[in-house]
Amino acid sequence: MIRTASAALTSTLLLAFAGVAARAQAPSGPIPPKPGVEVQLPPKDSQAKLKVQVALVNTPVTVRDGRGEMVHNLEASDFQITDNGVAQRISHFDLGGDPLSLVILMETSSRIEPLLSQMRKTGILFTQTVMGPTGEAAVVGFNDSVDKLQDFTTNSDRIENTIAHLGAGTSGSKLYDAMALGVEMLSGRPQATADKPGRRRVLMIVSEATDVGSEAKLGEVLRQAQLANVTIYSVGLSATRAELQAKPKDTRPQITPPGTFPLPPQPGVPQTPTSEQNRYGNIDLMAAAVWVVQHIHNQVKDHALEIAATATGGAHLSTFKDRSIEKAIDEIGGELHSQYNISYTPTGADTPGYHEIKVSIARNDAKNLKVRARPGYYLAAPEG
């Protein structure tokens, strides 16, 4: 009896293992349906689910007249927006009223130590002029390290106290790593929807236009900033005055699209917007901004702050001549609360790659108005 039971048990186990092996070796393709069983088809919109979708695109729009004054009397119906040439419907429109989520990046490198006394006095400008009564802010300091000095708070005293006690660090400047942290922090703030504006996400940098030692690349950071609807403003510190001096306007005709180059590179020289500038003269910031986002693994050494602001629809103000750090911050605060905030949910524009945003004004006096908005965003192809 024992031998018979043992044999039966062995036969049972062999059959079980055989079933497991059979399942493990089952074909990976579709299994033919059994006769009389209705075949279940995938939903018709299954292919649509594979397409990349952007929930909402937010673009701040600054409009100035011929004298450089902000224009405040426009309505949503005055604006026209296209995404890769496809007209879009505006889902949210506001003039300077949406609350801000602000990350303040302050360089604390020993190279700018003489300027720290001025920077420590700017806290009240950030809280009163930039944040406004409904805003929140966080503070990040960076040199050879990137340090979160104050997380998001609506408490003005905490922001002012943090900035008032900035300390000088080492000689490094991990600007791009600090920008990456700022974008990551802002990405976690309440995101706008079609029927709820959420918060405007603003990254404000007070720094030299120099990066030393970052692992992040500028193009990577700007891609993420564009997808997260982060607008970058920057105040260039005095160490960069020489390269930020105004240059003669480039009046040469543009014979190639933005982000492309008219001629092959010089032998042995990598082709970048700044190398082309050295070859031909004045740099086209819009073309450089598009190029950097499209070529995220290439590094642009010059004009990083200007390119970052241009790529996201913000502004860069250098501190030279009669513009102090305080005045630059005050100017940026004034613009933030006087610009149009426009959102749309992209339709007919879900193709992976670079998406060009164009904002225009449909009014009789449009030719006398200067419009500034983000140039676009990069949509990566879905994985798999």
Image (spheres, rainbow, N blue to C red):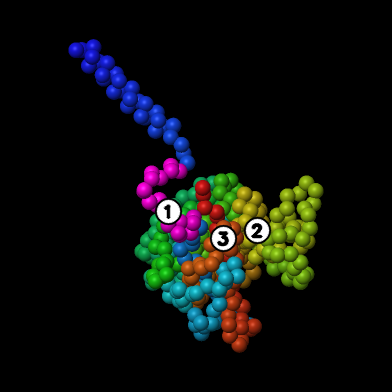
Vertically, is 145 above or below 121? above
Q: Nearer the viewer, residue 43 or 151?
A: 43
Main secondary structure of the magenta stretch: loop
* Image x and y of residue 48, in percent: 48, 59
Q: Does 69 lie within the magenta span?
A: no
Asked which quadrant contains residue 185, the reply is bottom left
Q: Quadrant of residue 278?
A: bottom right
Residue at the spot of label 1: 41
For mark 1, does the 10 Å Cα neighbourhood hold few (<14), some (14 to 19), or many (20 or more) residues?
Answer: few
SS for callout 1: loop
Q: CA distance from mark 1 to mark 3?
A: 26 Å
Dot 3 or dot 2: first in sequence order is 2
**Bounds of the magenta segment:** 30-50
Which quadrant does the N terminus fall into? top left
Sequence-first tag of 2 and 1 = 1
The reply to whether residue 53 is visible in this rendering is: yes
Residue 119 visible to an observer of this rendering: no
List the residue tagged with mark 2: 291
Residue that carries the numbered disc 3 in the rendered image: 351
